[in-house]
Image: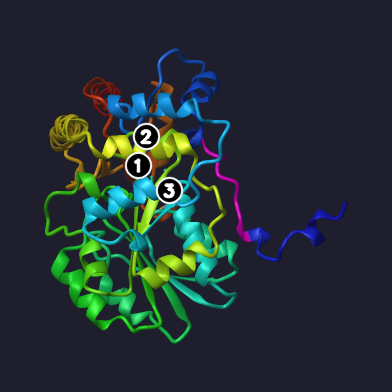
């Protein structure tokens, strides 16, 4: 077979996902490292696990696995519409926020179209852009690693189709203040769709954060992406959603596979929306772990970015690849940010307090030895 002649021309730009230790499931990391106990703080998973209400609903839904699920997820769309104060036609479901990103790219991008992506942000925007053969245009970050909307505006051309903004941003944990985003949206031309990934929306509570669903309501050219993987702790179920103008949602629905979200995930998501206690407990655990991390970094003289999410980005002041390895030897897996050019920075997910303590212990052992 002449595979190299058969695959699409974009193929050399594509990379399979699981190539690094930090991307493997925890069992496999355990095997690779030969360790009994592994603390995986590289995926921003919610250590609490799904809401009890969601688990019960999913168990019930298992009995219907012989049937196809609702194609568009009617019941969940209606409930989400109520919660967000929009209409069901403003919302659509996807097999995780990752698929939502992909569907938007597939709907809008032609080869040679330009996509503006901040330099330090979630990697799937670039992957989706490459897949479509479109051209990524990187916008540098501000000095303090916040997203620089002026730099984004400067890069808009007649060929720009999409702008990806992650708010709160992964991997920095910073937010775009509402007044900045609003002023930006007033200046973005009509041929550009601004995609705002709010995977960590439910954790954000300060620094001027405002959900861009507000701008959808004001009829701006904005498409918001959310997920049940993070605060709802259902990453394994694969379900997310998008909120945008009805015509945009309709366009993306032309591309969506018919049964992209399974019925078990739909049932779990629906039930978890009604469990405010679970969200509150997730935030509480997160706040405890975050304070412990902040205190540790201050004690060690490391600069960190105050986070509006369930992870902290820290400048360790030393080679982050070497530090990653030494933490891994001790069973603590974090995210090395050297691929972004941040060669001394790590992103650490806020696990359960005991997981954060294990990270702190390992870090101090290494640094203070
Ligand atoms: C985790 C994450 C996602 C992926 O969410 P899924 O719903 O699990 O696909 C998307 N965007 C950002 C910014 C994330 O951090």
Q: Which mark is residue 62?
A: none
| Dots 2, 1 in contact, CB < 8 A | yes
Give the quarter of the figure containing the C terminus: top left
Q: On the rendered structure, is 366 left or right of 262? A: left
Badge 2 or badge 1: first in the primary sequence: 1
Residue 19 is one of the magenta-drawn residues: yes
Residue tagged 3: 73
Q: Is residue 233 above or below residue 164?
A: above
Question: 213 or 5: which is nearer to us?
Answer: 213
Residue tagged 2: 268
Q: Which residue corresponds to the image point at 37% horizontal and 57% vertical from the top-left?
A: 242
Residue at disc 1, CB closer than 8 Å to ligand 1: yes
Question: 60 or 294: which is nearer to us?
Answer: 60
Q: How many marks?
A: 3
* Camera-side mark, 3 or 2: 3
Q: Which residue corresponds to the image point at 47% horizontal and 38% vertical from the top-left?
A: 263
| Dots 3, 1 in contact, CB < 8 A | no
* Camera-side mark, 3 or 1: 3
Badge 3 or badge 1: first in the primary sequence: 3
Q: Which residue corresponds to the image point at 23% horizontal and 37% vertical from the top-left?
A: 274
The crowding category of the residue bearing disc 3, from other C-alpha atoms within 10 Å (few below 14, some 14 to 19, many at least 20), is many
Colour mode of the rendering = rainbow
Q: Which mark is residue 228?
A: 1
Residue 181: percent from the left, percent from the top? Answer: 21, 70
Residue 35: percent from the left, percent from the top? Answer: 47, 15
Residue interval drawn in magenta: 13-20
């Amino acid at each position: 077979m002449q595979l190299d002649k058969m695959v699409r021309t974009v193929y050399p730009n594509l990379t399979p996902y699981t190539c690094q230790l930090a991307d493997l499931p925890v069992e496999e990391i355990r095997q690779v490292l030969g360790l009994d106990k592994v603390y995986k703080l590289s995926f921003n998973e919610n250590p609490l696990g799904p809401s009890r209400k969601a688990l019960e609903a999913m168990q019930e839904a298992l009995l219907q696995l012989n049937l196809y699920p609702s194609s568009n997820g009617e019941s969940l769309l209606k409930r989400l519409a109520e919660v967000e104060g929009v209409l069901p036609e403003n919302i659509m479901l996807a097999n995780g926020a990752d698929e939502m990103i992909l569907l938007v790219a597939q709907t809008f991008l032609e080869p040679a179209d330009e996509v503006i992506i901040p330099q330090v942000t979630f990697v799937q925007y670039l992957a989706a852009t490459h897949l479509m053969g479109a051209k990524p245009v990187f916008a540098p970050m501000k000095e303090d690693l916040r997203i620089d909307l002026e730099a984004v505006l400067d890069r808009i051309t007649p060929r720009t189709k999409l702008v990806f903004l992650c708010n709160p941003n992964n991997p920095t944990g910073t937010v775009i203040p509402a007044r900045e985003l609003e002023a930006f949206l007033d200046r973005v031309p009509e041929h550009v769709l601004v995609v705002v990934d709010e995977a960590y929306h439910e954790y954000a509570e300060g620094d001027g954060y405002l959900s861009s669903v507000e701008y959808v309501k004001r009829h701006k050219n904005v498409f918001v992406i959310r997920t049940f993987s993070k605060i709802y702790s259902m990453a394994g179920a694969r379900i997310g959603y998008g909120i945008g103008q009805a015509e945009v949602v309709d366009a993306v629905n032309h591309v969506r596979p018919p049964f992209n979200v399974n019925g078990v995930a739909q049932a779990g998501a629906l039930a978890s929306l009604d469990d405010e206690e679970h969200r509150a407990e997730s935030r509480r655990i997160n706040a405890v772990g975050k304070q412990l991390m902040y205190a540790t970094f201050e004690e060690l003289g490391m600069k960190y970015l105050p986070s509006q999410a369930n992870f902290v980005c820290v400048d360790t002041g030393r080679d982050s690849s070497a530090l990653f390895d030494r933490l891994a030897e001790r069973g603590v897996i974090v995210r090395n940010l050297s691929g972004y050019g941040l060669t001394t920075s790590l992103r650490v997910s806020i696990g359960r307090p005991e997981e954060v303590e294990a990270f702190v212990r390992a870090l101090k052992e290494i640094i203070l030895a």
